[in-house]
Image (tube, rainbow, N blue to C red):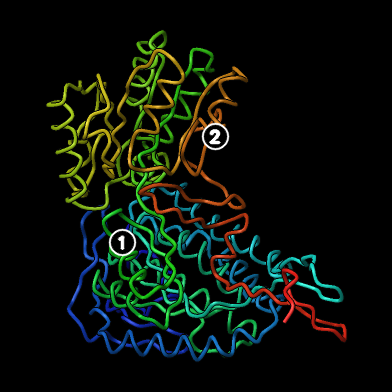
Amino acid sequence: MNLESLHSLKLFLNAGDKTLPAVSRFGQQLAGNGDACTTFSPIDGTSLAQFSDASSDQIDDAIAQAQTSFEMWRTVPAPKRGELVKAIGDIAREHKQLLADIITLECGKIVQESLGEVQEWIDICDFAVGLSRQLHGLTIASERPEHRMMEQWHPLGPIGVITAFNFPMAVWSWNAMLALVCGNTIIIKPSEKAPLCALACHRIVTLAQERCGIDIPALNQVILGRADAGAHIAASTAIPLVSATGSVPMGRKVASVVGARLGRSLLELGGNNACILTPDANLDLAIRGVVFSAVGTCGQRCTTMRRLIVHKSIAQEVKQRLVAAYQTLPIGDPSVNGTLIGPLIDQLSVDAMARALDNSVKEGGEILCGGVTADVPESLGGFYVKPAIVAMQAQTATVETETFAPILYVMEYDTLDEAIALQNDVPQGLSSSIFTNNLQEAELFLAATGSDCGIANVNIGTSGAEIGGAFGGEKETGGGRESGSDAWKNYMRRATNTINYGKELPLAQGIEF
Protein backbone atom coordinates (compact mmCIF):
# COMPACT_ATOMS: atom_id res chain seq x y z
CA MET A 1 0.00 0.00 0.00
CA ASN A 2 1.22 3.50 -0.82
CA LEU A 3 -0.13 7.01 -0.82
CA GLU A 4 -1.37 6.86 -4.39
CA SER A 5 -3.23 3.60 -3.83
CA LEU A 6 -5.60 5.27 -1.39
CA HIS A 7 -7.95 6.51 -4.09
CA SER A 8 -10.17 8.43 -1.73
CA LEU A 9 -7.32 10.34 -0.14
CA LYS A 10 -8.28 13.31 -2.29
CA LEU A 11 -10.94 13.93 0.33
CA PHE A 12 -8.21 15.01 2.64
CA LEU A 13 -5.29 16.18 0.53
CA ASN A 14 -4.82 17.76 -2.85
CA ALA A 15 -4.78 14.94 -5.37
CA GLY A 16 -1.27 14.02 -6.38
CA ASP A 17 0.35 16.65 -4.18
CA LYS A 18 2.63 15.28 -1.48
CA THR A 19 3.35 18.70 0.03
CA LEU A 20 1.35 19.17 3.20
CA PRO A 21 0.18 22.49 4.65
CA ALA A 22 1.86 23.36 7.93
CA VAL A 23 -1.18 25.30 9.15
CA SER A 24 -4.73 24.13 8.41
CA ARG A 25 -7.93 25.77 9.53
CA PHE A 26 -11.47 25.94 8.21
CA GLY A 27 -11.25 27.18 4.64
CA GLN A 28 -7.53 27.90 4.75
CA GLN A 29 -4.29 25.94 4.31
CA LEU A 30 -0.90 27.61 4.64
CA ALA A 31 2.56 26.44 3.68
CA GLY A 32 5.10 26.39 6.46
CA ASN A 33 7.92 28.90 6.76
CA GLY A 34 10.22 26.70 8.82
CA ASP A 35 12.56 23.76 8.21
CA ALA A 36 11.63 21.00 5.76
CA CYS A 37 10.51 17.58 6.97
CA THR A 38 9.72 14.32 5.17
CA THR A 39 7.48 11.60 6.57
CA PHE A 40 7.97 7.90 5.87
CA SER A 41 5.81 4.81 6.11
CA PRO A 42 7.16 2.24 8.59
CA ILE A 43 5.70 -0.46 6.36
CA ASP A 44 8.39 -0.18 3.71
CA GLY A 45 10.28 3.02 4.45
CA THR A 46 8.89 4.91 1.45
CA SER A 47 8.40 8.65 1.51
CA LEU A 48 4.79 9.68 2.07
CA ALA A 49 4.79 13.44 2.16
CA GLN A 50 6.81 16.56 2.80
CA PHE A 51 6.10 19.70 4.77
CA SER A 52 7.87 22.72 6.15
CA ASP A 53 7.48 23.40 9.86
CA ALA A 54 5.14 26.18 10.90
CA SER A 55 7.13 29.23 11.97
CA SER A 56 6.76 30.98 15.32
CA ASP A 57 4.81 33.78 13.65
CA GLN A 58 2.45 31.27 12.04
CA ILE A 59 1.86 29.55 15.37
CA ASP A 60 1.15 32.90 17.04
CA ASP A 61 -1.33 33.70 14.28
CA ALA A 62 -3.03 30.34 14.80
CA ILE A 63 -3.31 31.02 18.53
CA ALA A 64 -4.82 34.45 17.87
CA GLN A 65 -7.30 32.91 15.44
CA ALA A 66 -8.19 30.28 18.04
CA GLN A 67 -8.92 32.99 20.60
CA THR A 68 -11.16 34.94 18.22
CA SER A 69 -13.08 31.80 17.28
CA PHE A 70 -13.35 30.78 20.93
CA GLU A 71 -15.11 34.05 21.74
CA MET A 72 -17.77 33.09 19.18
CA TRP A 73 -17.97 29.35 19.92
CA ARG A 74 -18.42 29.74 23.69
CA THR A 75 -21.69 31.59 23.10
CA VAL A 76 -23.19 28.66 21.20
CA PRO A 77 -25.37 26.54 23.55
CA ALA A 78 -23.71 23.28 24.53
CA PRO A 79 -26.41 21.04 22.92
CA LYS A 80 -25.83 22.91 19.65
CA ARG A 81 -22.09 22.32 20.02
CA GLY A 82 -23.01 18.67 20.48
CA GLU A 83 -24.68 18.67 17.07
CA LEU A 84 -21.33 19.48 15.47
CA VAL A 85 -19.63 16.67 17.34
CA LYS A 86 -22.41 14.31 16.26
CA ALA A 87 -21.76 15.29 12.64
CA ILE A 88 -18.04 14.67 13.13
CA GLY A 89 -18.80 11.17 14.40
CA ASP A 90 -21.22 10.51 11.54
CA ILE A 91 -18.69 11.52 8.89
CA ALA A 92 -15.96 9.48 10.58
CA ARG A 93 -18.31 6.48 10.36
CA GLU A 94 -18.81 7.13 6.65
CA HIS A 95 -15.05 7.14 6.04
CA LYS A 96 -14.03 4.60 8.69
CA GLN A 97 -12.10 2.30 6.36
CA LEU A 98 -10.21 5.12 4.67
CA LEU A 99 -9.28 6.68 7.97
CA ALA A 100 -8.02 3.30 9.16
CA ASP A 101 -6.01 2.90 5.95
CA ILE A 102 -4.27 6.20 6.65
CA ILE A 103 -3.36 5.09 10.17
CA THR A 104 -1.98 1.80 8.85
CA LEU A 105 -0.01 3.52 6.13
CA GLU A 106 1.50 6.17 8.35
CA CYS A 107 1.85 4.38 11.70
CA GLY A 108 2.16 0.72 10.75
CA LYS A 109 -0.81 -0.59 12.70
CA ILE A 110 -2.53 -3.74 11.53
CA VAL A 111 -5.90 -3.16 9.86
CA GLN A 112 -8.02 -4.34 12.80
CA GLU A 113 -6.23 -2.09 15.26
CA SER A 114 -6.53 0.89 12.90
CA LEU A 115 -10.26 0.25 12.54
CA GLY A 116 -10.44 0.01 16.31
CA GLU A 117 -8.76 3.38 16.71
CA VAL A 118 -11.25 5.07 14.38
CA GLN A 119 -14.03 3.39 16.36
CA GLU A 120 -12.60 5.00 19.51
CA TRP A 121 -13.01 8.37 17.79
CA ILE A 122 -16.61 7.53 16.85
CA ASP A 123 -17.33 6.33 20.39
CA ILE A 124 -15.97 9.47 22.04
CA CYS A 125 -18.18 11.52 19.72
CA ASP A 126 -21.22 9.60 21.00
CA PHE A 127 -20.04 10.11 24.57
CA ALA A 128 -19.49 13.84 24.03
CA VAL A 129 -22.89 14.34 22.40
CA GLY A 130 -24.59 12.96 25.50
CA LEU A 131 -22.32 15.03 27.68
CA SER A 132 -23.37 18.21 25.86
CA ARG A 133 -26.61 18.17 27.88
CA GLN A 134 -24.94 17.34 31.19
CA LEU A 135 -22.35 20.08 31.75
CA HIS A 136 -23.84 20.85 35.13
CA GLY A 137 -22.59 22.00 38.50
CA LEU A 138 -23.91 21.66 42.05
CA THR A 139 -26.37 23.58 44.15
CA ILE A 140 -24.85 23.94 47.61
CA ALA A 141 -26.56 24.66 50.93
CA SER A 142 -25.61 28.07 52.31
CA GLU A 143 -25.16 28.83 55.99
CA ARG A 144 -26.66 32.28 55.41
CA PRO A 145 -30.48 32.71 55.34
CA GLU A 146 -32.05 33.57 51.99
CA HIS A 147 -28.85 32.74 50.16
CA ARG A 148 -28.08 30.08 47.59
CA MET A 149 -24.72 28.77 46.44
CA MET A 150 -24.11 27.03 43.16
CA GLU A 151 -21.29 26.24 40.82
CA GLN A 152 -21.11 26.70 37.07
CA TRP A 153 -18.73 25.35 34.49
CA HIS A 154 -17.61 27.65 31.68
CA PRO A 155 -15.48 27.13 28.55
CA LEU A 156 -11.78 27.48 29.21
CA GLY A 157 -10.32 28.85 25.95
CA PRO A 158 -8.05 27.61 23.17
CA ILE A 159 -6.73 24.13 24.02
CA GLY A 160 -3.31 22.93 22.85
CA VAL A 161 -3.22 19.21 22.03
CA ILE A 162 0.18 17.58 21.45
CA THR A 163 -0.22 13.99 20.27
CA ALA A 164 2.00 10.95 19.72
CA PHE A 165 2.34 8.74 16.66
CA ASN A 166 0.91 5.57 18.18
CA PHE A 167 -2.71 6.76 18.53
CA PRO A 168 -2.79 9.77 16.23
CA MET A 169 -6.57 9.94 15.81
CA ALA A 170 -7.82 8.52 19.10
CA VAL A 171 -5.84 10.79 21.44
CA TRP A 172 -6.74 13.89 19.41
CA SER A 173 -10.41 12.92 19.50
CA TRP A 174 -10.40 12.17 23.23
CA ASN A 175 -9.35 15.75 23.81
CA ALA A 176 -10.95 17.58 20.87
CA MET A 177 -14.46 16.13 21.06
CA LEU A 178 -14.81 16.89 24.77
CA ALA A 179 -13.15 20.28 24.41
CA LEU A 180 -15.43 21.28 21.51
CA VAL A 181 -18.57 20.27 23.40
CA CYS A 182 -17.31 22.27 26.38
CA GLY A 183 -17.06 25.37 24.16
CA ASN A 184 -13.32 25.50 23.45
CA THR A 185 -11.25 25.71 20.28
CA ILE A 186 -8.43 23.29 19.43
CA ILE A 187 -4.86 23.66 18.24
CA ILE A 188 -3.36 20.25 17.51
CA LYS A 189 0.38 19.71 17.12
CA PRO A 190 0.64 16.09 15.96
CA SER A 191 3.75 13.97 15.97
CA GLU A 192 5.88 14.79 12.95
CA LYS A 193 5.64 11.05 12.24
CA ALA A 194 1.86 11.22 11.71
CA PRO A 195 0.87 14.48 9.95
CA LEU A 196 -1.47 12.75 7.45
CA CYS A 197 -3.60 11.42 10.29
CA ALA A 198 -3.92 14.90 11.82
CA LEU A 199 -4.89 16.46 8.49
CA ALA A 200 -7.43 13.71 7.88
CA CYS A 201 -8.99 14.43 11.27
CA HIS A 202 -9.05 18.12 10.46
CA ARG A 203 -10.73 17.45 7.13
CA ILE A 204 -13.49 15.53 8.89
CA VAL A 205 -14.09 18.49 11.20
CA THR A 206 -14.22 20.81 8.18
CA LEU A 207 -16.78 18.60 6.45
CA ALA A 208 -18.84 18.51 9.65
CA GLN A 209 -18.75 22.31 9.94
CA GLU A 210 -19.96 22.58 6.35
CA ARG A 211 -22.73 20.05 6.99
CA CYS A 212 -23.88 21.94 10.09
CA GLY A 213 -23.48 25.41 8.58
CA ILE A 214 -20.97 26.51 11.24
CA ASP A 215 -18.74 29.20 9.74
CA ILE A 216 -16.35 29.71 12.65
CA PRO A 217 -12.89 29.63 11.06
CA ALA A 218 -10.57 28.19 13.69
CA LEU A 219 -12.44 25.64 15.79
CA ASN A 220 -9.79 23.01 15.02
CA GLN A 221 -6.39 23.97 13.63
CA VAL A 222 -3.45 21.75 12.75
CA ILE A 223 0.11 22.96 13.30
CA LEU A 224 2.79 20.78 11.73
CA GLY A 225 6.23 20.94 13.25
CA ARG A 226 8.62 19.26 15.62
CA ALA A 227 9.51 19.74 19.28
CA ASP A 228 10.01 23.50 18.85
CA ALA A 229 6.40 23.90 17.71
CA GLY A 230 5.14 22.02 20.75
CA ALA A 231 7.33 24.14 23.03
CA HIS A 232 5.96 27.32 21.47
CA ILE A 233 2.39 26.21 22.09
CA ALA A 234 3.23 25.19 25.66
CA ALA A 235 4.76 28.61 26.37
CA SER A 236 1.79 30.64 25.12
CA THR A 237 -0.15 32.37 27.89
CA ALA A 238 -3.13 32.49 25.51
CA ILE A 239 -3.53 28.71 25.84
CA PRO A 240 -4.93 27.90 29.30
CA LEU A 241 -4.59 24.12 28.92
CA VAL A 242 -2.01 22.01 27.11
CA SER A 243 -2.80 18.31 26.78
CA ALA A 244 0.33 16.35 25.89
CA THR A 245 0.74 12.65 25.15
CA GLY A 246 4.19 11.14 24.73
CA SER A 247 7.36 10.24 26.56
CA VAL A 248 8.18 11.16 30.14
CA PRO A 249 11.05 13.49 29.10
CA MET A 250 8.68 15.33 26.75
CA GLY A 251 6.07 15.58 29.48
CA ARG A 252 8.55 16.99 31.96
CA LYS A 253 9.43 19.77 29.51
CA VAL A 254 5.79 20.58 28.79
CA ALA A 255 4.86 20.58 32.48
CA SER A 256 7.82 22.79 33.33
CA VAL A 257 7.03 25.37 30.65
CA VAL A 258 3.27 25.41 31.30
CA GLY A 259 3.75 25.43 35.06
CA ALA A 260 6.16 28.36 34.89
CA ARG A 261 3.32 30.50 33.50
CA LEU A 262 0.81 28.92 35.94
CA GLY A 263 -1.13 27.29 33.13
CA ARG A 264 -2.73 23.86 33.22
CA SER A 265 -1.26 20.71 31.74
CA LEU A 266 -2.96 17.36 31.12
CA LEU A 267 -0.27 14.71 30.75
CA GLU A 268 -0.51 11.14 29.44
CA LEU A 269 3.03 9.83 29.53
CA GLY A 270 4.93 6.59 29.96
CA GLY A 271 3.58 3.26 31.08
CA ASN A 272 5.47 0.23 32.38
CA ASN A 273 2.47 -1.96 32.88
CA ALA A 274 2.44 -5.21 34.80
CA CYS A 275 0.18 -8.22 35.07
CA ILE A 276 0.07 -10.64 37.98
CA LEU A 277 -0.79 -14.31 37.33
CA THR A 278 -1.87 -16.15 40.47
CA PRO A 279 -2.19 -19.91 40.96
CA ASP A 280 -5.97 -19.44 40.75
CA ALA A 281 -5.82 -17.85 37.31
CA ASN A 282 -7.63 -19.30 34.31
CA LEU A 283 -4.51 -19.79 32.20
CA ASP A 284 -6.35 -20.20 28.91
CA LEU A 285 -7.87 -16.76 29.45
CA ALA A 286 -4.67 -15.30 30.83
CA ILE A 287 -2.41 -16.36 27.97
CA ARG A 288 -4.72 -14.73 25.44
CA GLY A 289 -4.89 -11.54 27.49
CA VAL A 290 -1.15 -11.39 28.00
CA VAL A 291 -0.28 -11.96 24.35
CA PHE A 292 -2.59 -9.23 23.05
CA SER A 293 -1.48 -6.74 25.69
CA ALA A 294 2.21 -7.48 25.14
CA VAL A 295 2.42 -7.52 21.33
CA GLY A 296 -0.53 -5.40 20.14
CA THR A 297 0.62 -2.42 18.03
CA CYS A 298 4.05 -4.07 18.10
CA GLY A 299 4.42 -3.05 21.74
CA GLN A 300 3.86 0.63 20.98
CA ARG A 301 0.95 1.34 23.28
CA CYS A 302 1.27 3.25 26.51
CA THR A 303 -0.81 0.42 28.00
CA THR A 304 1.37 -2.35 26.53
CA MET A 305 2.10 -5.12 29.05
CA ARG A 306 5.83 -4.99 29.69
CA ARG A 307 6.12 -6.99 32.92
CA LEU A 308 4.53 -10.34 33.80
CA ILE A 309 4.72 -11.36 37.44
CA VAL A 310 3.91 -15.07 37.76
CA HIS A 311 3.54 -17.29 40.80
CA LYS A 312 6.42 -19.76 41.00
CA SER A 313 4.08 -22.76 40.97
CA ILE A 314 2.86 -21.97 37.43
CA ALA A 315 5.84 -20.04 36.05
CA GLN A 316 7.31 -22.81 33.93
CA GLU A 317 4.00 -23.69 32.29
CA VAL A 318 3.23 -20.03 31.60
CA LYS A 319 6.61 -19.44 29.96
CA GLN A 320 6.23 -22.51 27.74
CA ARG A 321 2.72 -21.56 26.65
CA LEU A 322 3.71 -17.96 25.94
CA VAL A 323 6.71 -18.97 23.83
CA ALA A 324 4.51 -21.36 21.86
CA ALA A 325 1.93 -18.63 21.28
CA TYR A 326 4.58 -16.09 20.20
CA GLN A 327 5.93 -18.50 17.61
CA THR A 328 2.56 -18.54 15.83
CA LEU A 329 2.23 -14.76 15.48
CA PRO A 330 2.15 -13.61 11.82
CA ILE A 331 4.61 -10.72 11.32
CA GLY A 332 4.61 -8.56 8.21
CA ASP A 333 2.78 -5.94 6.16
CA PRO A 334 0.07 -4.57 8.47
CA SER A 335 -2.23 -3.78 5.54
CA VAL A 336 -2.52 -7.51 4.73
CA ASN A 337 -5.40 -9.32 6.41
CA GLY A 338 -4.18 -11.90 8.90
CA THR A 339 -1.05 -10.02 9.95
CA LEU A 340 -0.99 -9.56 13.73
CA ILE A 341 2.37 -7.83 14.17
CA GLY A 342 3.32 -4.84 12.04
CA PRO A 343 6.52 -2.80 12.17
CA LEU A 344 8.00 -0.49 14.75
CA ILE A 345 7.70 3.14 13.80
CA ASP A 346 11.36 3.73 12.87
CA GLN A 347 14.96 2.57 13.17
CA LEU A 348 15.45 4.42 16.46
CA SER A 349 12.80 2.17 17.99
CA VAL A 350 14.52 -0.94 16.62
CA ASP A 351 17.81 0.24 18.11
CA ALA A 352 16.15 0.91 21.47
CA MET A 353 14.74 -2.62 21.53
CA ALA A 354 18.17 -4.09 20.74
CA ARG A 355 19.79 -2.12 23.58
CA ALA A 356 17.12 -3.18 26.04
CA LEU A 357 17.55 -6.85 25.14
CA ASP A 358 21.34 -6.62 25.42
CA ASN A 359 21.08 -4.87 28.78
CA SER A 360 18.56 -7.34 30.14
CA VAL A 361 20.95 -10.22 29.39
CA LYS A 362 23.79 -8.35 31.13
CA GLU A 363 21.50 -7.99 34.15
CA GLY A 364 20.92 -11.74 34.35
CA GLY A 365 18.00 -12.17 32.00
CA GLU A 366 17.42 -15.00 29.53
CA ILE A 367 15.82 -14.30 26.16
CA LEU A 368 13.26 -17.08 25.69
CA CYS A 369 12.21 -15.98 22.20
CA GLY A 370 12.18 -13.02 19.84
CA GLY A 371 14.63 -10.33 18.83
CA VAL A 372 15.20 -7.48 16.41
CA THR A 373 15.46 -9.63 13.28
CA ALA A 374 12.13 -10.65 11.81
CA ASP A 375 11.59 -13.03 8.90
CA VAL A 376 9.77 -10.76 6.46
CA PRO A 377 10.18 -10.25 2.70
CA GLU A 378 13.19 -8.10 1.91
CA SER A 379 11.01 -5.95 -0.31
CA LEU A 380 9.20 -4.56 2.70
CA GLY A 381 12.30 -2.84 4.01
CA GLY A 382 10.47 -1.58 7.07
CA PHE A 383 11.21 -1.84 10.78
CA TYR A 384 10.09 -5.34 11.68
CA VAL A 385 11.04 -7.21 14.84
CA LYS A 386 10.06 -10.40 16.62
CA PRO A 387 8.23 -9.82 19.92
CA ALA A 388 10.52 -10.98 22.72
CA ILE A 389 10.04 -12.70 26.06
CA VAL A 390 12.81 -12.32 28.62
CA ALA A 391 12.93 -14.29 31.88
CA MET A 392 14.36 -12.07 34.63
CA GLN A 393 15.64 -13.01 38.07
CA ALA A 394 14.90 -9.56 39.45
CA GLN A 395 13.35 -6.23 38.49
CA THR A 396 16.45 -4.51 37.18
CA ALA A 397 17.05 -0.99 35.91
CA THR A 398 16.24 -2.10 32.36
CA VAL A 399 12.95 -3.64 33.45
CA GLU A 400 12.03 -0.45 35.32
CA THR A 401 12.57 1.60 32.15
CA GLU A 402 9.85 1.72 29.50
CA THR A 403 11.09 0.58 26.10
CA PHE A 404 8.53 1.32 23.38
CA ALA A 405 8.84 -2.09 21.74
CA PRO A 406 7.39 -5.60 22.19
CA ILE A 407 9.51 -6.90 25.09
CA LEU A 408 7.80 -8.82 27.88
CA TYR A 409 9.85 -9.34 31.06
CA VAL A 410 8.73 -12.36 33.11
CA MET A 411 9.43 -12.50 36.85
CA GLU A 412 8.33 -14.89 39.60
CA TYR A 413 6.86 -14.34 43.05
CA ASP A 414 5.92 -16.25 46.23
CA THR A 415 3.22 -14.13 47.91
CA LEU A 416 0.64 -11.76 46.49
CA ASP A 417 1.93 -8.92 48.68
CA GLU A 418 5.34 -9.46 47.10
CA ALA A 419 3.83 -9.40 43.59
CA ILE A 420 1.90 -6.18 44.21
CA ALA A 421 4.98 -4.52 45.68
CA LEU A 422 6.99 -5.59 42.63
CA GLN A 423 4.32 -4.25 40.29
CA ASN A 424 4.20 -0.87 42.05
CA ASP A 425 7.98 -0.48 42.36
CA VAL A 426 8.48 1.37 39.07
CA PRO A 427 8.32 5.10 38.29
CA GLN A 428 5.28 4.72 36.00
CA GLY A 429 1.69 4.14 37.11
CA LEU A 430 -0.63 3.76 34.14
CA SER A 431 -2.20 0.31 33.75
CA SER A 432 -2.15 -2.97 35.66
CA SER A 433 -4.01 -6.24 35.82
CA ILE A 434 -4.39 -9.48 37.73
CA PHE A 435 -5.66 -12.84 36.56
CA THR A 436 -7.30 -14.78 39.39
CA ASN A 437 -10.52 -16.56 40.25
CA ASN A 438 -9.92 -15.88 43.94
CA LEU A 439 -12.22 -13.08 45.18
CA GLN A 440 -9.89 -12.09 48.01
CA GLU A 441 -6.94 -11.75 45.64
CA ALA A 442 -8.96 -9.63 43.21
CA GLU A 443 -10.28 -7.32 45.92
CA LEU A 444 -6.83 -6.92 47.51
CA PHE A 445 -5.42 -5.95 44.13
CA LEU A 446 -8.10 -3.27 43.71
CA ALA A 447 -7.83 -1.93 47.27
CA ALA A 448 -5.92 1.14 48.42
CA THR A 449 -3.08 -1.19 49.38
CA GLY A 450 -3.12 -2.84 45.94
CA SER A 451 -2.28 -1.49 42.49
CA ASP A 452 -1.11 2.14 42.48
CA CYS A 453 -2.05 2.64 38.81
CA GLY A 454 -4.76 4.74 37.22
CA ILE A 455 -6.12 1.58 35.57
CA ALA A 456 -6.47 -1.69 37.50
CA ASN A 457 -8.10 -4.66 35.75
CA VAL A 458 -9.18 -8.13 36.82
CA ASN A 459 -9.09 -11.04 34.36
CA ILE A 460 -8.30 -8.87 31.36
CA GLY A 461 -4.95 -7.52 30.18
CA THR A 462 -3.47 -4.08 30.67
CA SER A 463 -4.38 -2.90 27.17
CA GLY A 464 -7.72 -2.07 25.57
CA ALA A 465 -9.28 0.76 27.59
CA GLU A 466 -12.76 1.72 26.44
CA ILE A 467 -14.54 5.04 26.12
CA GLY A 468 -16.46 6.10 29.22
CA GLY A 469 -13.85 5.30 31.83
CA ALA A 470 -11.30 7.97 32.71
CA PHE A 471 -8.01 7.08 31.04
CA GLY A 472 -4.69 8.00 32.65
CA GLY A 473 -2.23 7.17 35.36
CA GLU A 474 -0.18 8.25 38.32
CA LYS A 475 3.48 9.01 39.10
CA GLU A 476 5.55 9.57 35.94
CA THR A 477 2.50 8.82 33.80
CA GLY A 478 1.54 12.40 34.60
CA GLY A 479 -1.73 12.20 36.51
CA GLY A 480 -3.97 13.28 33.62
CA ARG A 481 -7.36 11.79 32.81
CA GLU A 482 -9.00 11.73 29.39
CA SER A 483 -11.80 10.03 27.49
CA GLY A 484 -14.51 9.43 30.08
CA SER A 485 -16.05 9.91 33.52
CA ASP A 486 -15.64 13.57 34.57
CA ALA A 487 -12.61 14.21 32.33
CA TRP A 488 -14.65 17.01 30.70
CA LYS A 489 -13.89 19.18 33.70
CA ASN A 490 -10.29 19.48 32.49
CA TYR A 491 -11.53 21.61 29.62
CA MET A 492 -13.63 24.02 31.68
CA ARG A 493 -13.26 26.56 34.46
CA ARG A 494 -15.40 26.44 37.57
CA ALA A 495 -17.16 29.42 39.09
CA THR A 496 -18.81 29.30 42.53
CA ASN A 497 -21.76 31.68 42.73
CA THR A 498 -23.55 32.96 45.83
CA ILE A 499 -26.94 34.60 45.33
CA ASN A 500 -28.59 36.71 48.03
CA TYR A 501 -32.33 36.81 47.37
CA GLY A 502 -33.18 38.44 50.73
CA LYS A 503 -33.12 42.00 52.07
CA GLU A 504 -30.44 41.47 54.70
CA LEU A 505 -26.67 41.05 54.35
CA PRO A 506 -25.56 38.34 56.77
CA LEU A 507 -21.89 37.43 56.58
CA ALA A 508 -20.39 33.97 56.53
CA GLN A 509 -18.87 32.44 59.66
CA GLY A 510 -21.17 34.61 61.77
CA ILE A 511 -18.99 37.67 61.33
CA GLU A 512 -20.61 40.97 62.27
CA PHE A 513 -19.32 44.11 60.57
State the residue position of label 1: 2
Q: Is residue 242 left or right of residue 126?
A: left
| Farthest residue, direction front | 513
| Horizontal side of residue 22 vs 118, given as left or right | left
Q: Position of residue 250 (x, y in %)?
A: 28, 60
Dividing the picture into quarters, in which one does residue 355 lie? Answer: top left
10 Å crowding of disc 1: few (<14), some (14-19), many (20+)? some
- Picture disc at residue 448: 2
Residue 367 found in image quarter: top left
Q: Residue at x 50, y 65 (%)?
A: 175
Left/right of residue 138 with respect to residue 239 in the rendered view: right
Where residue 345 appears, as percent x and y from the top left, is 26, 52
At 57% from the left and 48% from the top, the residue drawn is 466
In this rendering, the label closer to the viewer, 2 or 1: 2
Q: Secondary structure at mark 1?
A: loop
Helix, strand or loop at label 2? It is: loop
Q: CA distance from mark 2 to mark 1?
A: 50 Å
- Name the amino acid, label 1: Asn
Residue name at image x 54 percent, y 85 percent: 70
Mark 2 or mark 1: name the one nearer the start of the chain: 1
Crowding at dot 2, Cα within 10 Å, few <14 / some 14-19 / many 20+, comes out as few
Q: Above or below — where is 73 with respect to 379?
A: below
